[in-house]
Amino acid sequence: MKIALVHPETRQVKLAKIGFSWTVLCFNFFPPLFRGDWKWAAIMFGCTIITGNFSALVFMFIYNKLYIKELLSKGYQADNEISRQLLITYGFIVDDCDTYDHVVDDEDIDPFDF
């Protein structure tokens, strides 16, 4: 399942797959390299040097999630309603409904109040 993310200023669209990454399993650090995800390509390359292809067995489960979170942190947003609903369903973003009457400030929370 793929989602479309768009940057609001540059209008650049990136497609990202949700879930398991067969490409990372087969090609290790090359998928992030081809996507321009330099940070995770370098991290995965370092892990490959240290552990061999064992690191691919770990990253195949988490890389797509890391990639989507990285894009969202850079300001990318869902390009369409289906992508937005998928981001909500998989816990990447919270539904921004208007049903909340009061926004809780950090000052209102007492961590020692049980």
Image (cartoon, helix red, strand yellow):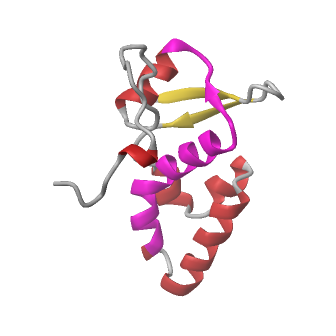
Q: Residue at x 74, y 51 (%)?
A: 36
Tally the marks.
0
Residue at (30%, 58%) from the top-left corner?
A: 111
Using residue 90 as the reference point, say whether residue 42 is left or right of it.
right
At a point 57% along the width and 36% down the height, the residue shown is: 16
User: In the shown orientation, is residue 35 left or right of residue 96?
Assistant: right
Quadrant in the rendering for residue 90: top left
Foreground pick, 30 / 62: 62
Q: Which residues are magenta?
A: 55-81
Residue 83, image x and y in percent? 51, 22
Q: Image quadrant for the C terminus?
A: bottom left
Above or below, 52 against 12 in this view is below
* Vertical side of 25 occupied by 21: above or below: above
Residue 68 in magenta? yes
Side of 65 relative to 8 (left or right): left
Residue farthest along the bottom direction in this orientation: 50
- Asked if residue 97 is among those painted magenta in the image, a careful observer would answer no
Q: Main secondary structure of the magenta part?
A: helix
Q: Residue at x 51, y 29 (%)?
A: 2
Q: Position of residue 71 (x, y in %)?
A: 64, 42
Nearest the camera: 4 or 102?
102
Give x and y (percent) for residue 14.
Answer: 68, 33
Query: Looking at the figure, which quarter contains the N terminus?
Result: top left
